[in-house]
């Protein structure tokens, strides 16, 4: 999940290739989403859009997923 950037095909593909199989984007270009779908890349893509992404706390979401036994990787980048 990266705020301030558009999720796109190349980033999702790299995540999938390196063993991270669920990518959460706030938004994605339609053509990039179609390319991910058409190429049947092995991974999950969740697109929240800004209203849903901004209205839920992603840290809380990660905590809930972990509570269900889903491994999450939290990367925090401080600028």
Image (cartoon, rainbow, N blue to C red):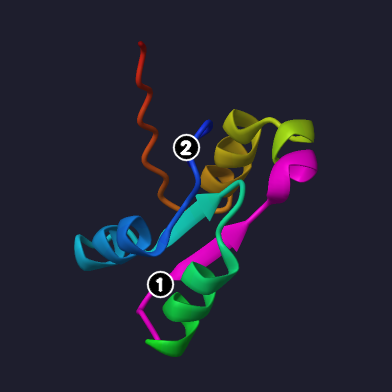
Say what secondary structure mark 2 lies in.
loop
Residue 63, picture quadrant:
top right
In the rendered image, which residue does mark 1 sit on? 43
What is the number of callouts on the image? 2
Residue 11, picture quadrant:
bottom left
Closer to the chain start, of discs 1 and 2, is 2
- Residue 36 falls inside the magenta stretch: no
Q: Tell me if residue 45 comes above or below residue 38 in the rendering.
A: above
Q: Position of residue 47 (x, y in %)?
A: 62, 57
Point out the stretch of residues depicted in magenta.
40-52
Q: Tell me if residue 13 comes above or below residue 25 in the rendering.
A: below
- Residue 50 falls inside the magenta stretch: yes
- Name the residue: 31% across, 61% down: 10
Q: Position of residue 21 (x, y in %)?
A: 37, 64
Residue 28, picture quadrant:
bottom right
Say what secondary structure mark 1 lies in.
loop
In the rendered image, which residue does mark 2 sit on? 2
- Name the residue: 48% across, 38% down: 5
Circle number at residue 57: none
CA distance for labels 1 and 2: 17 Å
User: Is 3 on the left-hand or right-hand side of 58?
Assistant: left
Q: Position of residue 1 (x, y in %)?
A: 48, 42
**Closer to the camera in the image, 58 or 38:** 38
- Name the residue: 79% across, 33% down: 55
């Amino acid at each position: 999940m990266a705020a301030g950037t558009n999720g796109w095909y190349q980033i999702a593909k790299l995540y999938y290739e390196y063993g991270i199989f669920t990518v959460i984007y706030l938004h994605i270009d339609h053509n990039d989403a179609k390319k991910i779908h058409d190429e049947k890349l092995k991974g999950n893509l969740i697109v929240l859009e800004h209203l849903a992404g901004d209205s839920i706390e992603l840290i809380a979401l990660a905590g809930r997923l972990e509570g269900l036994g889903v491994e999450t990787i939290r990367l925090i980048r401080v600028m």
